[in-house]
Amino acid sequence: MFAPRSSAGGWGCGRMDSSAEPVLVVDGLRKTFADLVAVDDVSLRVRPAGSLAIVGESGSGKTTVAKMIVGLERPTAGTIRACGRDRSSPARSTAERRLRGREVQIVFQDPYTSLDPRQTVERTLDEVLRLHHPDLDTDGRRARVRELRELVGLDARQLRALPRSLSGGQRQRVAIARALAAEPRVLILDESVAALDVSIQAQVLNLLADIRDETGVSYVLISHDLAVVRQLTEETIVMWRGAVVEQGPTGRVLDAPKHEYTKRLRASVPRPGWKPGRRSSEVSEEERR
Amino acid sequence: MSETRASGDAIADLEALAPPALLEVGGLVVDLLVEGELRTVLHDISLTVQPGEALGLVGESGSGKSMTARAIDRLLPEGARVRGSIRFDGRDVMALSGSALRRYRGEVAMIFQDPRAHTNPVRRVGDFMTEALRTNAGVPRHEAEDRAVELLESVGIADGRRRLTQYPHELSGGLLQRAMIATALLTEPRLLLADEPTTALDVTTQAEVMAILDELRRELGLAMVFITHNLELAAAVCDRTVVMYAGQVVEVRSSALLHTDPLHPYTAALAAARPDIASTADRLLAISGRPLSAFEAPPDECAFAPRCPHVRDRCRECRPPLVELDGGRSRCVRAEELRGRLGVRPHG
């Protein structure tokens, strides 16, 4: 259905065998804004075709970690390596920036604002291909656009549409196709299914699982939805106030959480017979501000 | 259910015994003016809320759940055409105007998803909290502020006096939403219309806000219509749940039975499509296609038919009526033959 282009097996830099080095290695990552420590000593590994979740509440630093990995924020300290290449400091050249784009891509939460309203889906994808795969000619790009379209389950008519005439789910498929057009080894999904209706969310989650099977891409999922985390990832790190407070296999972290915050997070998920709890300590803590 | 049919008199007696509903919406149809043409956004909405009851209103985007709340609070956009009836405590809501309408809106208070979008960033918390009391009820400022501080305390904000002098941006999302709940309670409402009040909040903050709503409701005997896209949340915190699809009510069910014994294939499909926090499914049971808006739904067939795994030819012959079944209601022509077969199966 969707054959990886490079004969080396898998996309971009590396190979797909499981014995391979982690495709993403983050060590001692730190980010401060003035005197606020947003991210404090975060380390993580993602293996080829692996899937890692970062969970935590707003302000826990999870999105800042994602932004540093993709290159939208500069780390205060620490190292980030993707495909064995350092990306801790800003790219010095256009060529370097493009190379990094073929290593890590990101899909944001809001499919409504992350697409250019004046560009058809086809042109959006074609533009990425021109940038990242200048070796492809017009026919080659057209064939590739069709492959990407089929991969994310859009039809030919939707290819010629502007974002405003697409539904939320369709737009998020376009955003995923655009990110995949660069053939990244790591795809960061920053709350990418959070805004979707439940019935559409299930379609996109199935799609993401298929894409990983077919291409060997790795995922870093930023999410507050623990059921989505369970469905899509094997490893989970839990962040609280900028630091990693718990990490391990997703099933273990969710079924037998060890840290107080993870326990509270798990207990806060509505379920039959659920009685929401008030936590007075946290309230008074915030009120002292 | 029971073999003996009650006689007409007995039914009348039963109705006299049952407590009168606080809110009664009957056959509500709303058309909105969109680009010069009238489009139906709500079709034949009927629901009741008993005093002190929490009723969930669940649906995907475009299902009409927020529009229903707006219609109840008489907040529909200009040019809206409304048919059917809305009765609150025996009063005809559609006929209210002027001071009677203002009084009604004090009795039926609304809280919204995004408190920041509903506050003026340059006005202090104390200002907007006490506005309704000062302008509508003529309560002196210091008295209104005392009441505000009391209510802030009841939603877990201890230093209310200081909060009144702050601006919205100085409060976190969870804190501001709690202040909005306190604001809604200032006019001593009997019904709270809560439109996705926790959707923008963190999961742990959501739990806390829900706990506060739950406690207050019980203490004050307050009824609530809780609007959410989250079936699990509605099932957990509401007594009964109304499921909406394409501007129609498709199911009314006791929340305890919503997941285990739903009456409409859409409710069952919605529950089955959600990933499970306790296990990883091989594949999720996605519903094909996308949700329809009310105006897209054909007038003479079931709106869910194109996506329904249980569809038959007769589903396309007429729009099904909302029928009573097993203590709930379902807008499915096959409801009776499917009863007991729609509960959530384990994934896989």
Image: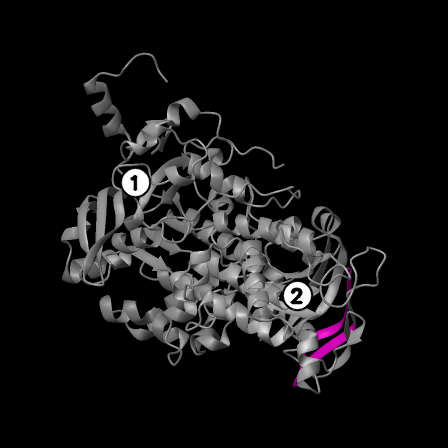
Q: Which residue is mark 2?
A: A183
Where B254 sits versus B55, above or below?
A: above
Q: Residue A103 colored magenta?
A: no
Q: Residue A31 colored magenta?
A: yes
Task: Classify 10 Å Cα crowding around label 1: few (below 14), some (14-19), many (20 and above).
Answer: some
The answer to which of A3 and A47 lies nearer the viewer is A3
- Looking at the image, can residue A36 be seen? no
Callout in the foreground (2, 1) = 2
Left or right of B194, for residue A174: right
Q: Percent from the top left, x then y, of residue B283?
A: 61, 42
Q: Percent from the top left, x then y, of residue A30?
A: 74, 77
Q: Percent from the top left, x then y, of residue B135?
A: 24, 71
Residue at x 79%, y 75% (from the top left corner): A85
Q: In the rendered structure, the residue with mark 1 lies on which chain?
A: B
Callout 1: helix, strand or loop?
strand
Callout 2: helix, strand or loop?
loop
Count the marks: how many? Answer: 2
The answer to which of B250 and A280 lies nearer the viewer is B250
Q: Amino acid at mark 1?
A: Thr
Question: Magenta segment range?
Answer: A27-47
Q: Percent from the top left, x then y, of residue B299?
A: 25, 41
The label on residue B48 is: 1
Q: Amino acid at mark 2?
A: Glu
The residue sitting at the right extreme is: A19
The label on residue B324 is: none
Is most of the magenta stretch helix, strand or loop? strand
Where A287 sits versus B318, above or below?
A: below
Q: In the rendered structure, the residue with mark 2 lies on which chain?
A: A
- Looking at the image, can residue B257 be seen? yes
Residue at x 27%, y 71% (from the top left corner): B134
